[in-house]
Image: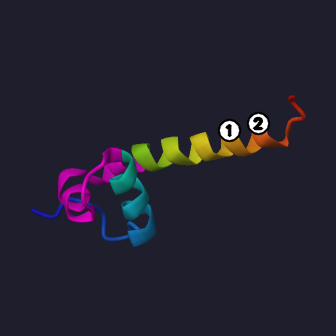
Amino acid sequence: MISACSFVRIKDLVVVAEICEKSVFQVWTIFDCYSFMLIKERIWALNLTTTYLNTLDIP
C-alpha cells in the first residue's frame, strides 16, 4: 500500500525517516500525502527558526 505522494522527493523522505527513526520504506508506506507535507512544513519551519536564531548576536 503506497500512500505517499508521487511528487515527494527522496531527500525529504530520508529527512523525515531520520527524524521519525523509521526506514525510508516505512515512511513511504505509512504517511499519506497530507501528513507527510505537515511534517515537511514543520521541519522547514524549524530549520528557518534555527537559521534565524543563528543570525542573532546572542552571547
Confirm whether the magenta stretch covers residue 27.
Answer: yes
Confirm whether the magenta stretch covers residue 59.
Answer: no
Query: Left or right: where does residue 2 sit relative to residue 15?
Result: left
Task: Evaluate if marks 2 and 1 touch, with contact meaning CB atoms under 8 Å apart.
Answer: yes
> In the image, what residue occupies the spot 24% across and 61% down?
28
Point out the residue furthest to the top here. 59
Query: Left or right: where does residue 1 sit relative to residue 53?
Result: left
Q: Vertical placement of 46 versus 10: above or below?
A: above
Judging by the rendered image, the residue that carries numbered circle 2 is 53
Tell me which amino acid carries mark 2. Answer: Leu
> In the image, what residue occupies the spot 86% across and 29% down?
58
Q: CA distance from mark 2 to mark 1?
A: 6 Å
Point out the residue furthest to the right here. 57
Q: Quadrant of the N terminus?
A: bottom left
> How is the structure coloured here?
rainbow
Judging by the rendered image, the residue that carries numbered circle 1 is 49
Q: Nearer the viewer, residue 45 or 57?
A: 57
Q: Position of residue 47 (x, y in %)?
A: 62, 46
> In the image, what residue occupies the spot 37% across and 54% down?
18
Q: Which residues are magenta?
A: 20-37
Q: Quadrant of the C terminus?
A: top right
Point out the residue furthest to the front here. 59
